[in-house]
Image (cartoon, rainbow, N blue to C red):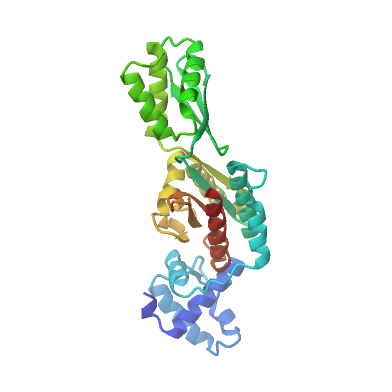
Amino acid sequence: MIAELDARAREILRLVVDAYVATGEPVGSRTLAQRVGLNLSPATIRGVMAELEHRGLLCAPHVSAGRIPTDAGLRLFVDGILEIGALPPEEKQSIAEACRARGKNLPEILDQATHRLAGLSACAGLVVAPKTDRGLRQIDFVSLGPGRALVILVTEDGLVENRVIETPPGLPLHSLTVAANYLNAHLRGRSLAEVQAEVQAEIGAQQAALDALTAKLVTSGLAIWAGQPGGQMILRGASHLLQDIHALEEIERVRKLFEALETRAGMMRLLEATGDAQGVKIFIGAENAIFAETGYSMVLAPYADSRERIIGAVGVIGPTRLNYARIIPMVDYTAKIIGALMG
């Protein structure tokens, strides 16, 4: 659609977006007419704004002459008009220091990166760290009462994942210890998929020194881990999303957004949204189902391991009037720093 707009319409759309990003308020033709170098009368600007509104790129949130960009207008601006600058050296240094690996395990690095993104962007920082094929260090089972147990899995780089599973009826407590000892003897830095294949083959061949109940616990526990997406999501700076909110309905929309983000399905949809391509992706408003009717946008970039497999994503969540020109390079640089640490 950008090719359908002449230079004057593109410039007015840019000015409306710039004003909206800066103030969050509707902008009128008289305000735009005062901009240095525009050299257009308020009447001419009103005509161009009316055409942009007809195309669905601007809208009037109230009964007034002021206009704000729609999600479609912001998308057109981001894709066809936005000029992205370089990240300032001091912000690069700040992000690099937060991601410094010395003395920290992976969860701590990701947590620090999320905090730093939230602070620099004044939005919510987000990191999705999915289940990966990293080597395992330890597996433990903790009884939660009859029929339930907590599985604790620790990777070699310190990432911890927990999952509640159902246990076989009548399982004695000592079976949890036996099962953990058996699995830990098979780990030796292997991935979960490798451990699962070996253990199931051994149990299937009846070579395991386990009673029937313990064997069932082991196989069911591995099946739970292998059959469901694992991982973790770190969200920091969520309070930034509430700073300019006063209406109860807006607070309710943010609450629903938090609920969607906290579900494992929502977390994995965020990762899947990055696709297989490298680089930053921008989701404006309802373009992502998780953000439907929330009025928020997400700038998200995947990070990959040394084999160029996408294993996680880092990003920023904020109102649709994000300063995209500043935040896009910030997210991109953070993703590259984290990816470099994956080895």
Residue 93 position in % (x across, y down)? 67, 61
Residue 47 in the image, given as x and y percentages of width and height:
45, 83
Quadrant assignment, res 229: top left
Whole-percent x and y of residue 218?
A: 42, 21
- Please identify the residue farthest to the left as the structure is shown: 205
Q: How many numbered marks are there?
A: 0
Residue 65 in sight in this render: no
Q: State whether residue 138 is above or below residue 38.
A: above
Q: Residue at x 68, y 64 (%)?
A: 90
Location of residue 46 with respect to 125 vertically, above or below: below
Relative depth, front residue between 138 and 231: 138
Picture residue at 49% right of the left edge, 16% below the top: 176
Identify whether 263 is placed above or below 65.
above
Residue 303: where, in percent of width, then height?
49, 53
Quarter of the rendering containing residue 119: bottom right
Residue at point 47% right, 9% down? 172
Q: Quadrant of the N terminus?
A: bottom left
Placement of 328 over or under 30, stated as above or below? above
The residue drawn where x is 36% and y is 16% is 207
User: From this viewpoint, is residue 167 visible?
Assistant: yes
Relative depth, front residue between 255 and 329: 329
271 or 340, nearer to the observer: 340
Between 207 and 145, the one nearer to me in the picture = 207
Image side of residue 197 versus residue 165, left or right: left
